[in-house]
Image (cartoon, rainbow, N blue to C red):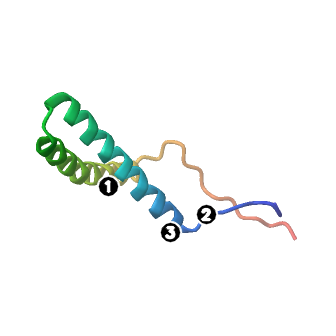
Amino acid sequence: MANAVTEKPYRSLIKAISWRITGTLDTIFISFLVTGKLKAAVSIGVIELGTKILLYYLHERVWNRIPLGRVKAQEDYSI
């Protein structure tokens, strides 16, 4: 696999942050369309930001306990 490309952990972190910002801006926009009030929309977006981070964390912790789709790594005995 000479052409394999891997990502550094900080790239994943930056992608996660940019995705969360994108999602929050979407929530603010939709909230503004529904309420017509910018202050309410931003408040909803800020609350959503915190709750989504917490929910994602809890979701990950639960999935770490579920064996579905996991396989044990096999030893490579080739020379």
Cα–Cα gap, marks 1 and 3: 18 Å
Give the left or right position of residue 45, taking residue 68 as reference. left
* Of the image marks 2 and 1, the number of the one nearer the N terminus: 2
Labelled pair 3, 2 in contact (Cβ < 8 Å):
no
Give the left or right position of residue 79, taking residue 58 as reference. right
| Residue 68 on image: x %, y % | 49, 42
| Residue 41 on image: x %, y % | 17, 41
Please identify the quadrant where the N terminus is shown: bottom right
Q: Which residue is mark 1?
A: 57
Q: Tell me the SS state at disc 2.
A: loop
Decide: few, some or many residues near mark 3? Use Cα within 10 Å; few <14, some 14-19, many ≥20. Answer: few
Residue in front for this viewpoint, 45 or 73: 45
Res. 10 mark:
3
Residue in front for this viewpoint, 58 or 79: 58
| Residue 27 on image: x %, y % | 27, 40
Seen at 50% across and 61% down, the residue is 12
* Of the image marks 1 and 3, the number of the one nearer the N terminus: 3
Seen at 22% across and 30% down, the residue is 33
Q: Tell me the SS state at disc 3.
A: helix
Seen at 17% across and 44% down, the residue is 44
Q: Is 79 drawn above or below residue 49 in the view shown?
A: below
Res. 13 mark:
none
Judge depth for marks 1 and 3 and give the one in front.
Answer: 3
Q: Amino acid at mark 1?
A: Tyr
Q: Which residue is mark 2?
A: 7
Cα–Cα gap, marks 2 and 1: 21 Å
Q: Quadrant of residue 8?
A: bottom right
Decide: few, some or many residues near mark 2? Use Cα within 10 Å; few <14, some 14-19, many ≥20. Answer: few
Q: Amino acid at mark 2?
A: Glu
Residue in front for this viewpoint, 55 or 70: 55
Cα–Cα gap, marks 3 and 2: 8 Å
| Residue 17 on image: x %, y % | 39, 58
